[in-house]
Structure formats: C-alpha cells, structure tokens
C-alpha cells in the first residue's frame, strides 16, 4: 500500500538511523522479485536511462497508433509509460512492478538477464556452439506480418522433418535457441525479419542452414546463401546478449549502409523510427520471440517472481521532468541520473513519426 506523504505522523514514526531514514509503517506492502541494490549500483543509473528512452518512445508510439487508428494499442503503450513509476525500497533494495511489454526497454533488460541466467550454463557446455543467422528477402510493411508467420511455419516444418529423419535413420536432432528480430532499413523503407540461432556444433548449423534454404526455395528463389551467416561463438555471454536483443533495435542509423564501427554509447546521427517500430511490434504480436528447441532447461529461477510481505519500506515515484524517482517522504532522488546530451538531443529532435 502506498503511503501518502501528506498524512499526519500518527501512522508512522520516522527513526533517524545515521544517514538513513527508515519508515516504520503500520501497514505492510508486497514486493516482487529479488530487487535491485540501491547503493553503488550502476544498474540503477541504466534503469533511469532506459526509462527516459522508453517514455519518449512510447509517447511517439501512441501518436503513431492514434494516427493509424490502432486504438487497441494505445492503452498497451500507456501501460509501458507507467511501468515502474512507483518503486518500493526495502532493506537496501528497490522493487517495482513490470509492464512486461517488448517495447519497454526496462522490462526487456530484466527479461534478457533472466534468459541469460537460465541458458548460459547449458550453452557454455556445448562442444562448439555456433551462431547462425537465417534471413529471407526483405519486405515492405504490409507484408511483414505474413512473412513472420511464414518464417515461424517454415522453421517448425524443418524441425518436424529433421525429427522424423532422426527417428527413422538417426539423422541429427535439432537443438538450439532461436530468437526473432527485425531490422528496419530507413533508406529503402524495407523490413528485414531474421532469426539468430545458437546451436551446439558447426555441422548442426550447416544442416539447419541447408534445410532453411531448401524450404524457402521450394517454390521460388527467396533465400540466397549470402544472408545466412555462420560463425563460432566466441564469448558465450557476449554472444547470448547479442542474440537476445528482444526483437527490434530502437535506435537506428538512418543510413543502413554506414559500416563505420560505433563506439559503445555513441548515438550520433541515430534516429528512432516510431512508425516502423509500431509495424514491427504489430507483426510480432502474439508470437514468442525467444524460444529453445530440442533440449530442456533445469527449473527456471523461481525467485525472480516470488513475492513477500514487508513492513519497513519507502516509496519512490517517478518524475518525468526530473528523470528520476523521488522519495515520497524525503524528496531524495533515487539515482541522481543526468541525461547524456546526445541522448537528450536524439529524444527531442530525432524521433521520426513519418507515415509510409
Ligand atoms: Zn516495462
């Protein structure tokens, strides 16, 4: 239960404990998950940064959905705007509730960490894990949903066919993780949905690549060899992070042929194509983006979503202008986040709402 800071002191006592104030409430509150450390934790600053990006993005997505008459999407985007607006701190950690939408960079960050925790040891035990990228021809916005449905169908046909072959004559049973992603080519207005796979060995990667090419080229030539990239996994964790991007890049280079290597954090020239992202989220809707096949994981980390009742807690409310969570009792800022000038400029000037 949230405490109103204007209530009289009858319902709480404020105890001075060194530099920290603890709120002793007569009420309980429920916290979910394992929480995030509040002191000396760079993850909190990252969360503040993600919140700023997400808020700017969803406001643009709301405009796009309104202009397109996609009224069902407007509330879903607003839910993300309010994601983690209220945080509760308890015993040195903060807890929040999550909107769990794939356009929420905060929630994606958390889910990504969760996936990495769950899959890391299995993939790390594979003899020679390989990364495989599977593409098809690029499409226009109106063909995107159908193309994604066909990708899912074709992959599942390949899996079934290989499984039958495996049962019948001992061919390889397909094992791996698969994540669906879609890039947007702003210069041409093209969409490029593709899969990133991690598989246990090079022969399996080659086998899947061959089946993929065959499946798509049955009727007409859609898939060439060029788009199907294959390389050994170098650093399992880094490559997992790379693979689980969670669907779509939010910051896009207007020139997709710009091959200059960007330093981490360099945002110069990037744009947010809100209309393209809305098209991608619509095409992704009701599909799982990250799936594994051919193996089972140990039980998932149950702590992630367990809840508990606590008595001593403080409430923090997000203030969009301050770009930070403010303690409802003390007025203290949670993260002391300062926006980077390049990002501030990008969010102000470079959100593209153009319809096409
Ligand atoms: Zn969220």
Image (tube, rainbow, N blue to C red):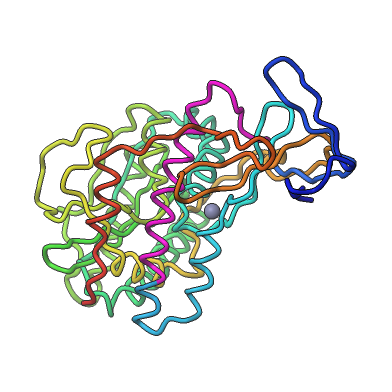
Q: Nearer the viewer, residue 336 or 147?
A: 336
Q: Residue drawn at (53%, 25%), measured in percent from left and top?
A: 41
Q: Residue drawn at (18%, 36%), measured in percent from left and top?
A: 262
Residue 56 image point, x, y percent: 38, 57
Residue 246 image point, x, y percent: 42, 51
Residue 81 image point, x, y percent: 50, 59
Residue at the far top: name it. Answer: 18
Please say if 51 is above or below 56.
above
Looking at the image, residue 4 sits to the left or right of residue 79; the answer is: right
- What stretch of residues is rendered in magenta? 34-62
Residue 169 image point, x, y percent: 46, 53
Q: Nearer the viewer, residue 340 or 102?
A: 340
Looking at the image, residue 315 sits to the left or right of residue 101; the answer is: right
Q: Residue drawn at (26%, 69%), measured in percent from left and top?
A: 353
Q: Quadrant of the C terminus?
A: bottom left
Give the image quarter of residue 165.
bottom left
Queried whether the magenta region covers residue 57, the answer comes back as: yes
Queried whether the magenta region covers residue 170, the answer comes back as: no
Q: Main secondary structure of the magenta part?
A: helix
**Number of labelled discs?**
0
Q: Residue drawn at (38%, 59%), measured in percent from left and top?
A: 57
Residue at the far bottom: name it. Answer: 69
Q: Nearer the viewer, residue 46 or 262?
A: 46
Please say if 149 is above or below 42.
below
């Amino acid at each position: 239960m949230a405490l109103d800071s204007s209530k009289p002191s009858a319902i709480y006592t404020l105890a001075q404990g060194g530099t920290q104030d603890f709120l002793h409430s007569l009420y309980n509150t429920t916290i979910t998950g394992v929480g995030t450390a509040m002191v000396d934790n760079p993850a909190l600053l990252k969360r503040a940064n993600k919140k700023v990006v997400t808020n700017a993005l969803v406001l643009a997505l709301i405009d796009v959905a309104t202009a397109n008459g996609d009224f069902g999407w407007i509330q879903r985007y607003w839910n993300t705007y309010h994601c983690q607006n209220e945080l509760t701190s308890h015993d040195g950690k903060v807890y929040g509730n999550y909107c769990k939408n794939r356009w929420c960079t905060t929630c994606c960050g958390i889910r990504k960490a969760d996936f990495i925790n769950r899959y890391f040891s299995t993939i790390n035990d594979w003899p020679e894990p390989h990364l495989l990228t599977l593409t098809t021809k690029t499409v226009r916005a109106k063909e995107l949903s159908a193309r994604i449905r066909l990708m899912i169908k074709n992959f599942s046909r390949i899996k079934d066919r290989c499984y039958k072959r495996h049962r019948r004559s001992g061919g390889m049973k397909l094992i791996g993780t698969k994540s669906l992603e879609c890039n947007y080519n702003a210069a041409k207005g093209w969409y490029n949905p593709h899969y990133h796979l991690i598989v246990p060995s090079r022969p399996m990667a080659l086998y899947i690549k061959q089946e993929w090419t065959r499946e798509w080229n049955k009727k007409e030539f859609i898939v060439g060899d060029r788009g199907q990239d294959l390389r050994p996994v170098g650093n399992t964790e880094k490559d997992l992070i790379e693979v689980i991007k969670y669907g779509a890049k939010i910051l896009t280079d207007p020139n997709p042929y710009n091959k200059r290597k960007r330093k981490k954090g360099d945002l110069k020239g990037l744009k947010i194509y809100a209309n393209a992202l809305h098209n991608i989220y619509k095409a992704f809707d009701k599909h799982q983006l990250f799936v594994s096949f051919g193996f089972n994981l140990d039980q998932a980390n149950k702590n992630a979503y367990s809840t508990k009742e606590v008595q001593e807690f403080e409430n923090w409310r997000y203030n969009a202008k301050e770009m930070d969570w403010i303690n409802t009792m003390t007025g203290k800022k949670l993260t002391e986040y300062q926006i980077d000038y390049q990002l501030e400029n990008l969010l102000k000037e470079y959100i593209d709402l153009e319809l096409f």
